[in-house]
Amino acid sequence: MIRRFINKVFGNAARTKAAAGPRILPLAEHGIRREQIHPCALKTTRALKDAGYSAFVVGGAVRDLLLGRDPKDFDVATNALPEQVRQVFRRSRLIGRRFQIVHVYCGADTIEVTTFRAASIEKEVEGEEADDSRVTTADGMLLRDNVFGNQAEDAERRDFTVNALYYDPETEEVWEWHGGVEDARKKVLRIIGDPGQRFREDPVRMLRAARFAAKLDFHIDAATRAPIAELAGMLERIPSARLFDEMMKLLLSGHAERGVRQLRAEGLHHGILPMLDAILDDADRQRFLHAALHDTDERVREGHSASPAFMLASLLWFDMQAEWRSNQAKGQRDQTALYDAMDAVLERQRDLLAFPRRFDGTIKEIWSLQPRFEQRSGARPYRLLSHPRFRAGYDFLLIRAKGGDAPQELADWWTQFPEASDAEREAMLIKPQPGEAKPKRRRSRRKPPANEAAVEVKLG
Ligand code: ATP
Ligand code: MG
């Protein structure tokens, strides 16, 4: 009863706002020119308009352009239904179930086209929702969201005011419904609607708040921030694959160091990435993590790509080492102990996080190269140099050195060795230490059969 009353009040407030219509800003007030829009997004909005629909560039692209940043991608919103969008574009595909969108292909690029969605969840509370196009749990978490609506409703269901901006490339106008342009100027991240309700509908929005605050260098508005600590626990119920994707977005955004600090500040770091919990509670691990995040951020900001595999290798490195040592203590031989540890740690994390198997190969290579960097005598350094993953392994070694997990001298040696002349390299080699294991082949007293000897010669 009370809930219904509250919904009525909020619902009416929202309707009044929508009834007032959008504030439409001309070019002079926002400065976003048509030429700044990706040609594929322009083609998409134009084709939809020619077919009689309305179409706008929305979300992050408008926000980033407004802030003078390079957008990561361009999304389009329209009043055409997904099936109608498909009819306009020969090269397009309907994807998603929880949230249906159409991918429009244009050369090698893809534009995501979403149909305007309705925002209010009060409908279900009042029992008007009979079909399965929108499904929520008893406490208001949205499981599926395919109720289509008009632009006003679409703006209302978006997460933050700065993400609810619509750009019309034909007229070069920005349409705003919730004061996003002003908030962008003030560098405020403000959720649209009632913060508690919006975070309950989709707890991932809390992670998005931390990610955007870090990426945009915004501060989270006090009312938006208030319910987060209390609701953080709801993240445990998010499917692990979605959490993984969202965390990777944060960690590979180029603002991971600030992002992780923001997660901590909001009390959001527990239970999202179990390995992050462990790292942030331990001083040594923290130092290493910050070296890894700092390095990844620099790399992304310099326009290089950062790989999820490298990030995962960093996040799990301490767990893997602990497991490795424990295997050795149980009497396993070095190599077996290492390979068993890598498998065990990756399997354990997969249960918790559902991260894709396709990263395993690279993660294991980065890890298994680490002990090989310690071997600096004979032919071994030369062999390591020609390993296809040498670069990734070396980058990882540098981070270990910065994070206090490997001697800086070792990292410097490996910085110099590839650059050195043949003679300098010879001089750099370290004499085998007494007791250092020599390659097996040489230890063998058995005289090799003729064909095996031939193979050895061939391999050089
Ligand atoms: P990025 O630069 O990281 O891509 P973005 O704002 O474009 O940022 P996307 O995840 O690409 O973020 O989403 C596109 C838009 O869809 C957002 O700007 C927002 O309006 C809306 N959106 C995405 N996820 C949610 C969500 N969980 N709840 C409400 N709105 C969302
Ligand atoms: Mg985006």
Image (cartoon, grey):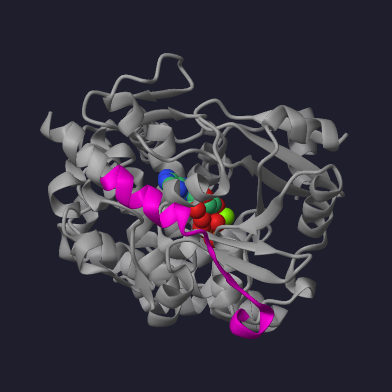
* Closer to the camera in the image, 51 or 262: 51
The image quarter in which residue 242 lies: top left
Residue at (43%, 34%) from the top-left corner?
A: 241
Residue displayed at 33% across by 25% down: 124
User: Would you say 431 lies left or right of 71 here?
Assistant: left
Q: Reply above or below: 213 against 20.
A: below
Examine the rendering and report whether any part of residue 277 can be seen: yes
What are the residue bounds of the magenta stretch?
Answer: 10-30
Residue 157 screen position, x and y as percent:
43, 46
Residue 348 visible in the shown view: no
**Majority SS type along the magenta span:** helix
Query: In which quadrant will I find the N terminus?
Result: top left
Q: Nearer the viewer, residue 454 or 349?
A: 349
Q: How many marks?
A: 0
Between residue 4 and residue 196, name the one nearer to us.
4
Ligand 2 in which quarter: bottom right
Residue 134, position in %: x, y?
43, 25
